[in-house]
Image (cartoon, rainbow, N blue to C red):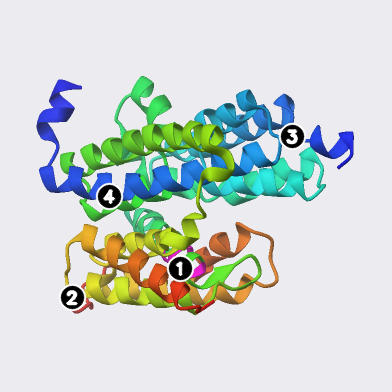
Amino acid sequence: MRSLYRTVHRGDLRDVLALASAVGVVGASFGALAAAADVPVALTVALSTLVFAGGAQFLVVTVVTAGGGAVAAVVAGLLLNARHLPFGLAMAGTVADRWPARLLGAHLLLDESVAFARARGTGRRARTAFWLCGGLQFVFWNVGTVAGMLAGAAVPDPDAFGVDAAFPAGLLALLLPALRRADARRVGLAAAAVALVATPVLPAGLPVLAGLLGLAAAGGPAGDRGTR
Amino acid sequence: MTGATTGALNWPAVLALAAGTYLLRLAGLALRGRLRVPERAERYLDLGATALLVALVATAALTDGAGFAGWARAGGVAVGALAAWRRAPFVLVVVLAAAVTALLRLLGVP
């Protein structure tokens, strides 16, 4: 931990804290939603600590509250989380070199930690950014969940603060350096188009996965044709 | 609400979701450690992560469920994107996007 602390870039810590604060607010709204849906406290805590995937957690509680069965809820949640497999393939070198660390790092594989690490390249700084982002998000998400359960209906709707816009904007800011490569830009545009077209017709999670079809726009090897 | 629906979210369901999610997260890391990935495939893995993240940004910015997320969110993200493109600090991008969306909602924009 000491070596991690020493290698943390101060700017990276500030950026991660900005995102983690937003995560805490959403965590509180999850806790409040689960409490309102009469999900037992222990189950809610288990969702936030063991599943630790915001989108899937909201989805299962919503499906169950709407009268859907547990199996349907779990399948929908797993579908939403399927993107973590290709994330893992791409991030293995950044997360860890050894096994025990990989087992822990897997649990911290999140959209935000992946995006943060990638925005910091592939070296030591990227690895630190990954663990810092994943670790702080875990803390903020779980503290937020418990606070939300306790406050219940007193938790305001995070949409009133525009938190739902903060996440895509933050992720996009992290992605911009990668998108300076021409092949990445082509793939990104195609992926966004496919995902948006697929959203009205496919269940949650699949449109984002369908974005992988954007790889067809990768074109020739290397991004050296890009404008840097 | 009947007992069947309130009881639907139970320990087996939560543990199955947790185990499945963890295995999905671990599978990629584990596979990559075992496979010797040729350089060309490596480029696709890298671009694949970009594709997923951009697809995630696009759907999170513009859609909610199966429909349009509304102009308030889209407007906030657009302002944040512009700020990011102009190389504004990350914190400012995040705060601007949220503030613009919140303001638009306050003004009654859906």
Residue B88 falls in which quadrant of the image?
Answer: bottom left
Q: Which residues are magenta?
A: B53-59
- Labels 4 and 1 positioned on one and the same chain: yes
Residue A131 x, y percent position in the rendering: 29, 35
Q: Are marks 2 and 1 on the same chain?
A: no
Where is residue A184 drawn, in percent x and y?
A: 33, 69
Helix, strand or loop under label 2: loop
Answer yes or no: is residue A89 visible: no
Does residue A157 lie above or below B104 as drawn? above
Identify the secondary structure beneath mark 4. helix
User: Please, what is the three-letter code of the amino acid marked with disc 1?
Assistant: Leu
Horizontal arrangement in the rendering, residue A217 relative to residue A60 (left or right): left
Residue at numbered disc 2: B86
Q: Please give the residue where the numbered disc 4 appears in the rendered image.
A: A18
- In the shown orientation, is residue A93 left or right of residue A41? left
Q: Which residue has dot 1 on it?
A: A215
